[in-house]
């Protein structure tokens, strides 16, 4: 139809993505370049298993650079698809543009805002397959039951934090499981997420308590080493808040019996969307650097014994809480 309307049409496809996508074909079209009097870059959004929209990256098609040049474009001059992207589904309006019916986002400012933070990265199923070949995969009923319950816990936390508009990412052991094996680690026994302290809200605690979570402990202050731990049944959700310190980011830890403080130092990172067990969640874009900071260069090897005060290579002692503040900064509940 477009060619009949005398458009010059080129289709780019998802031929060579950075990682093999989950739940969609590799060879699907990702965009069309259209030219008559002007150039139109038509980005194709595909539905993913996590009930969101995804678009490919231009360089997934080896022909992209040469085809763009024939339209007088480059990867740097196009507004979208420099990387893969992910969007929550949004409502659209049908408008007429020169006799052509076009769907546009109903909330254009929100769409443009979301575009700035839409970068998407895939879990590496190649790495996960390599891990499972080397170390096996625990498929015992106990392991499968834990993974399912941990997934439900993460899904519930995502629902509540999304409702509050609070950015979070999967962190610590949950992030390690994602990066290393595209799964939850069966022996981890908890779910870990991170939040920038600038995104902290006093609404977090009452929202979680109102939806079946129990506060297990509150460590630190909002301006120093805040960590919240909730329980749901016999599963634990740890929320670590991250602080800026020059070229680094860090989260805190507190030993309840002594008042000792610890900090875990990470190189600065940005956030990307990913799909983790059919959930659209954020991870550090610089995922391997984040994992190596927390688990060292031997992160590929499973480690069932872990001391949070000494095992992480990025842990530092950070003083002690004054005894007169203990009742405020170390609140432990049964």
Image (spheres, rainbow, N blue to C red):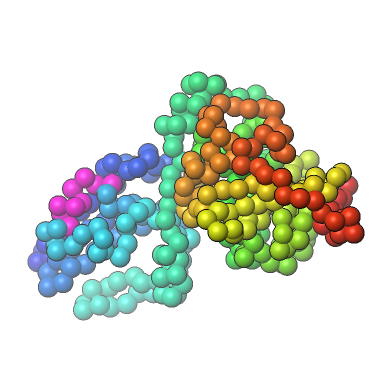
Is residue 102 in view? Answer: yes
263 or 277, nearer to the observer: 263
Q: Is residue 309 left or right of residue 87?
A: right
The stretch of residues the image draws in magenta is: 60-68
68 or 53, nearer to the observer: 68
Magenta highlight: main SS: helix
Quarter of the image with the N terminus in it: bottom left
Q: Residue 291: where, in percent of width, then height? A: 54, 40
| Point 56% across, 34% down: residue | 296
Q: Residue 15: where, in percent of width, then height? A: 26, 42
Report the number of numbered marks: 0
Q: Quadrant of residue 293?
A: top right
Q: Is residue 279 left or right of residue 310?
A: left
| Point 28% across, 78% down: residue | 96
Is residue 178 in view? Answer: no
| Point 71% across, 63% down: residue | 223
Q: Is residue 320 left or right of residue 98?
A: right
Q: Quadrant of residue 178?
A: top right
Question: Is 33 drawn above or below residue 175 in the view shown?
Answer: below
Q: Quadrant of residue 125?
A: top left
119 or 249, nearer to the observer: 249
Residue 201 lies in the magenta stretch: no
Q: Residue 110: where, in percent of width, then height? A: 46, 72
| Point 49% across, 55% down: residue | 270
46 or 328, nearer to the observer: 328
Question: Is 152 drawn above or below residue 181 in the view shown?
Answer: below
Q: Residue 210: where, in percent of width, then height? A: 77, 61
């Amino acid at each position: 139809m477009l060619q009949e309307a005398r458009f010059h049409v080129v289709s780019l496809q998802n031929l060579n993505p950075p990682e093999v996508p989950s739940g969609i074909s590799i060879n699907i079209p990702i965009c069309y370049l259209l030219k008559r009097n002007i150039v139109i870059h038509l980005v194709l959004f595909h539905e993913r298993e996590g009930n969101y929209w995804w678009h490919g990256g231009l360089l997934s098609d080896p022909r992209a650079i040469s085809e763009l040049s024939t339209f007088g474009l480059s990867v740097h001059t196009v507004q979208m698809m420099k990387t893969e992207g992910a969007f929550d589904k949004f409502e659209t309006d049908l408008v007429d543009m020169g006799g052509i019916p076009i769907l546009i986002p109903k909330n254009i400012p929100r769409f443009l805002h979301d575009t700035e933070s839409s970068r998407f990265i895939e879990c590496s199923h190649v790495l996960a397959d390599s891990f499972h070949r080397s170390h096996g995969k625990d498929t015992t009923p106990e392991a499968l039951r834990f993974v399912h319950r941990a997934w439900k816990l993460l899904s519930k936390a995502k629902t509540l934090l999304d409702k509050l508009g609070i950015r979070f990412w999967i962190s610590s052991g949950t992030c390690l499981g994602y990066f290393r094996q595209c799964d939850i680690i069966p022996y981890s026994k908890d779910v870990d997420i991170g939040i920038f302290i600038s995104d902290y809200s006093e609404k977090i605690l009452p929202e979680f308590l109102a939806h079946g979570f129990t506060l297990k402990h509150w460590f630190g202050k909002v301006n120093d080493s805040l960590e919240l731990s909730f329980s749901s049944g016999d599963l634990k959700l740890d929320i670590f808040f991250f602080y800026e310190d020059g070229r680094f980011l860090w989260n805190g830890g507190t030993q309840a019996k002594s008042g000792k403080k610890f900090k875990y130092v990470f190189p600065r990172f940005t956030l990307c969307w990913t799909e983790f067990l059919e959930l659209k969640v954020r991870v550090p874009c610089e995922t391997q650097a984040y994992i190596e900071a927390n688990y060292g260069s031997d992160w590929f090897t499973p480690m069932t014994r872990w001391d949070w005060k000494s095992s992480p290579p990025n842990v530092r002692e950070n003083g002690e809480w004054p005894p007169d503040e203990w009742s405020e900064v170390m609140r432990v509940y049964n």
